[in-house]
Amino acid sequence: MVSNQAIRADDTGSTLPKTTMAVLKLLHGHLGPYVSLGGRMGDYAVEKLGLKRHGLKEQSDVRVIVECEPNPPKSCLVDGLQASTGATYGKRNIFLIDSKTVRVRVINTETKKGLEFKLSERLQENIKKWFAEKVSLEKQSETIMSSNPQDLFIIKEFSDD
């Protein structure tokens, strides 16, 4: 069980540590490759775009656009991105667009700078292999969460002017 302290900011709204597998599991209900990929994308974007990680203060400097199939397992990206960026459906700053390919854009709405993420060919091959070999979802998540983002994604910077 994850304590409340692990997922909440102090009274000043200070930044939280990077998203953990425990937080992903708490939010999503179980681990898997796509919720973990969403967590890794969000953590990388928060750091590189200078986003304020969510906490007791309102998160208003982020917009996330997820393009993928609107069904699990790929739509599980959304939960990982919500956990890692603080964007939520309730705040209307995360959006899911039905698409056959996976593309995620995270935008700092204050600076108008953004990052676009696409899954690398190698990662896509690994996920197919893991499912074919029945590698546990937890092991898949551990591998993803310990990987360098540049090994998982094709990442491009852009400006949202």
Image (tube, helix red, strand yellow):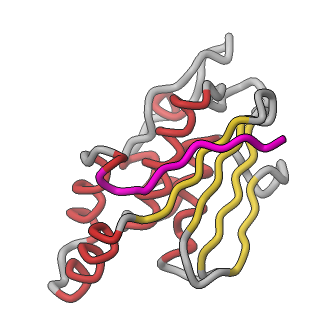
Query: Residue drawn 60% across and 59% down?
Result: 104
The quarter holding residue 110 reads top right
User: In percent of the image, x 45 and y 27: which residue is there?
Assistant: 17
Specify whether 97 is left or right of 78: right
Membership of 120 in magenta stretch: no
Q: Position of residue 4 (x, y in %)?
A: 52, 33
Q: In this view, does 144 lie above or below 149?
A: below
**The C terminus is located in which quarter?**
top right
x then y, percent, for residue 15: 57, 20
- Count of numbered tags: 0
Horizontal arrangement in the rendering, residue 47 relative to residue 133 (left or right): right
Point 21% across, 73% down: residue: 136
In the rendered structure, the answer to whether residue 59 lies left or right of residue 70 reads right
Q: Which residue lies furthest to the bottom in this view?
A: 132
Q: Magenta residues, as a range?
A: 151-161
Instruction: Name the magenta segment's main secondary structure.
Output: strand
120, 143: nearer the viewer: 120
Q: Position of residue 64 (x, y in %)?
A: 70, 52
Residue 87: x percent and y percent? 70, 46
> Seen from this angle, which residue lies furthest top?
12
